[in-house]
Amino acid sequence: MRAEYVVGEAAANLRRNMLLVVGAILAVFVSLFMTYMALIVNEMARKSTIRWQEGITIVAWLDDSDLATHSAIQSEVQGWDEVKRAEYVDKLATWEEFQVFFADQPELIQEADASAMPASVRLELIDNETHATVVARLSRIPGVDDVDEATDAIEDTLEASRLLNTGGIVLGVALGLSAVVMISNTVRMAIYARREEIGIMKLVGASNWFVRTPFLLEGLVEGLVGGALAFLAGWFGYRTFISNLDLGIIQTQVSDSFLISRGLMVLLFAAAAGAIGSLVGLRRYLQESD
Amino acid sequence: MIKLQGVTKVYDGATVAVRDATASIQKGEFVFLVGPSGSGKSTIIHLLMREEKPTSGEIWVAGRNIVELPDWKVPYLRRSVGTVFQDFKLLPNKTVFENVAFALEVIGRPRGMVAQQVPKVLKLVGLSSKADRLPRQLSGGEQQRVSVARAFVNRPLILLADEPTGNLDPATSVGIMRLLDRINRTGTTVVMATHDHAIVDAMRRRVIQLERGRIVRDENRGVYEGGRAPQGTPEAESASVDETSSPNGEAAVEDAATDIPTSEGA
């Protein structure tokens, strides 16, 4: 009887304020859709630039000579005037990188292993104007197989991903807050519409949770519906429009497991927004009642 | 069953609604709270159901100090205190049966108990044949019967009634009073705030009179106007002393409120 009652009341509340409820759901949807897309694009940027974080602009891939040779190369390069930092990355670390990079191509990972990975020395320069000179010098060192350098595109991608991170967080938080406010408003309206009934419930001794639960459920449903829509729209939007784009250097492939785990996070946020929204909506009523 | 000890209620730090009220009501008593509008009757009803907390003093209801009762326990206090108001407070879109059943449903009583108890109490208030009507299809007296049924269906220890006949004509009021009397005879303590002289004079029950928030008379088998009581008691006289605001009136009234032998034995 109790569960039946709670669900019935919540459904009645949702029907009664349809327009407001749709508004609240849309607010949750837009906010979380943007957050979800930002997470996906951010992941794309991360995968594309995984070797180029923290100022690294040149990677010198080494041949399979012994560790002593490798460290000799590393310390020599570290001594150069143009070099701010020369970081040695061994086979194992490269293997880990490789697995992240090709997470969505398990057959590739199956074929390879750590021993097939090249070690490398990665450079951060004091002044990027000296780029060409440094690359030329590196190529002449015995034991260096190949030299990769960050192109402008990678620099741009990194910059864009930083902007996206900040902008995405700011927008997501602002829209998330508005979603919470919208949900608390629908709950408040629902309470107002039923104030007479609530008054009588309290008069005859209904427990506070008995009175509150339908309104909590209402907010939760609004949040979860908005979150589920954001999940679906993000998933299909990504699969339809982004994943098969050819953006050259930018890696557009994001694994399903990433999409699902971040999607679940989005749902969790949606539920939290719903619960917080209804608690805020209930707050004034609670203060009055006790 | 009910005990007020030095209860004062001040609103917004200025308006004194109840001033140093002390009284004790035994199980099974029927008590009228009388006095003009604004004398503090309704405030006392609200204090007894913990709708409000006193500014100072102690209130005991059914063995519990309800001033110190934590908020989350208030619903459980309400389950042992039925309430009836002047404006009935019925839900307009529920039938008579549903209005009464609502009181049991929201405190989580099982369906079987609801189906069993509601017809019983509707029979008690004489509305068995109108169980399927909506409140707007009933007369004022009938609506108040529904409200009494709702207050009583959970068999509370105490029934609080705030001007229950305030919206009813005299003939209908008598019916409601018979009903409250019957409920009182089942052992339920009844406290009724009213300014209906005729009812108080006809019933001859304990009368607690309030004047600007102060208890000025507490008399067994009393009538509405203490001064015009046929058998003028000493208590009533001391109360009239207080009405003239003599400095010693306060102490005299406190004696009046606590030293009534019959109220202790009831």
Image: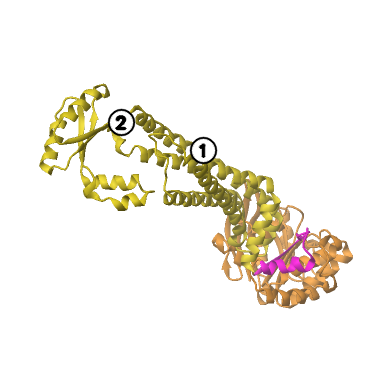
Image quadrant of residue A181?
top right
Q: Amino acid at mark 1?
A: Ala
The picture's colour for chain A is yellow
Farthest residue toward the right?
Answer: B171
Tell me where the magenta segment starts and ends, as one range. Answer: B80-105
Q: Amino acid at mark 2?
A: Ala
Residue A59 pos. (x, y %) = 24, 34
Residue A17 pos. (x, y %) = 69, 49
Q: Which residue is mark 1?
A: A174
* Mark 1 burial class by Cα count in 10 Å: few <14, some 14-19, many 20+: few
* Circle on res. A150: 2
Q: Is residue B9 above or below residue B32?
A: above
Q: Earlier in the sequence, mark 2 or mark 1?
A: 2
Pick the front one: A27 or B43: A27
Q: Residue at x 50, y 44 (%)?
A: A239
- Image quadrant holding the N terminus of chain A, namely bottom right
Are the residues under marks 2 and 1 on the same chain?
Answer: yes
